[in-house]
Each structure stands twice: as C-alpha cells, then as structure tokens.
Amino acid sequence: MSHLIELRARLLKAVGTVVAVFFVLFIYPGASVIYDLLAAPMLASLPEGTRMIATGVITPFMVPVKVTMMAAFVVSLPVVLYQIWAFVAPGLYRHEQRLALPLIISSSLLFLAGMAFCYFVVFKTVFQFIASFAPQSITPAPDIEAYLSFVMTMFLAFGVTFEVPVAVVLVVRMGIVTVEKLKEARGYVVVGAFIIAAVVTPPDVVSQFMLAVPLCILYEVGLLCARGIKPRAEDPESTEVATTPE
C-alpha cells in the first residue's frame, strides 16, 4: 500500500507539472503561436499565399490545444523522468542506480534529438520533395488535423529510433545478447530498418531513407557504447545490497 501511495504522489507531481506548463504556454506565447511554429515547415513548402485548412467545426481550437499539450509534455519531460527515477531508485542496487540515471538522461536527450532532427531536417526535405511532384493544376491545402496526426507519428517514429543506442546497451547489460552477436546481426538490422521505415513513414523514398539510415548509424553507436558494458551475470557488483539514494 505504501508503494501505491508513493506511486500516486509521483504521478500527481508529474501530471501537475505538465498541466502547469500547459497553462503557461497557453497564455504565453499562446496555442496559435505554437501551432504556427509547428506548421512552419509545411507552410514553407506550399505556394506563396496558400494556407492550411480546417474542416471541423472546433478543429481550429482543438488542434492548437493538442499541440500545446504536446509541447508542455516535452518541456516537462525532465521532471516526469525525475519522478520515475525517484520512484524506482530505492529498489535498485547501487550499481544499477549508477547505470539507470545516465540511461534516463541519455534516453530523454536522444528522444528530443530525434524530434529536432525530424523537425529541422526531415520535414523540410520531405515536404519540398512532395511539393515538387504536385501538378500545376492542383493547389495543396493540407488539413490541420491530418497534419497534426502526421507530425505526431513522425515525431514518435524518430524519437524512438534515436533510442536505439540505449536499447543496445540495455540488452548487452542484461545479458540477453553479446556485442559479438549484435555485430553479426548487422545485415538483419539494415533490412529491418528499411522495413520499419517503410511502415511508419509516408510512402516516399526520401522519408524512408532518412529514417532507416539514422537507425543503422545509431545501431553502430550503440555497439560502440556497449563495448565497455559488462553483462550483469559477469559483474561482481550485481550482488550488492540495494540502498536508498539520499
């Protein structure tokens, strides 16, 4: 029961932080400004003077609110991750605590890096590539709700892709597979990367290529980082008694 009470307290703090940041962002700079910032890559690829459209009655209000909530979660991510860390840390061994905190920090930074790469590089390239194929008789006018769904899917895809080094380190640390086996599986990883990219990205070769290539590169980065990691079964510190961090 005490663990459930602590879990509730940690969840309330995390959710409360996200809600508080949401209200701050909703007031300043405002939901419409945040959405305009998110829509900038798409607007830059459209013909001059063209705007996006909203087909729903309340869509012009709800979509910016959803975007603001997403931005609030991203801004609050350090606090959310700290609450997760504070809840699980007392049950970890000392050596696990030393490993878990860097993994939490690196995973959050890598997820944000994936979103930034998607926004600044992928969106600009993909939207311009798609716009170049639009016939002259068509005036593109994307729906804002469809655009938000596309953006969130791409952010999630690239954010998770950038977590590959963390995943490689974890499977090596847990003793599930060795670094040598992972090196031997490079060919399968390359094929799997392009299959995953084909499933989660739009049906154009540019976006698929821009997801698959970073995934393969990050896999190699994970192998480099995992070289210095001992499997748990071979680590003498794995028998240490769990302690509660100060």
Image (cartoon, rainbow, N blue to C red):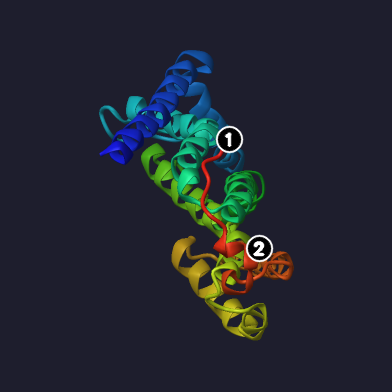
The answer to which of 213 and 88 lies nearer the viewer is 88
Measuring from the top left, give residue 119's x and y in whole percent: 60, 44
Residue 153, image x, y percentages: 44, 51
Count up the numbered dots: 2
Q: Residue at x 44, y 23 (%)?
A: 22
Q: Is residue 234 above or below residue 211?
A: below
Which residue is pictured at 37% across the width and 40% down the height? Answer: 145
Choose between 218 and 96: the one closer to the eye.
Answer: 96
Q: Nearer the viewer, mark 2 or mark 1?
A: 2
Examine the rendering and report whether any part of residue 135 can be seen.
no
Label 2: few (<14), some or many (≥20) within 10 Å?
some
The answer to whether the residues at label 2 and label 1 have Cβ atoms under 8 Å apart is no
User: Where is residue 185 shown, x and y percent of the image?
Assistant: 61, 83
Taking 181 as reference, is 146 above or below it? Answer: above
Q: Which residue is mark 2?
A: 214
Q: Residue sitting at 62 percent across and 84 percent down?
A: 181
Instruction: Indicate which disc residue 52 carries.
Output: none
Amino acid type for the residue under numbered disc 2: Pro
How far across and how far down the image is residue 241, in percent?
53, 54
Instruction: Tell me if 23 is positioned left or right of 29 in this view.
Output: left
On-image quarter of the N terminus: top left
Mark 2 or mark 1: which comes first in sequence? 1
In this rendering, is residue 107 above or below 5? Answer: below
Q: What amino acid type should be assigned to the residue bearing mark 1?
A: Ala
Q: Residue furthest top?
A: 27
Q: For marks 2 and 1, give the CA distance.
A: 24 Å
Instruction: Determine which residue is flagged by label 1.
Output: 40
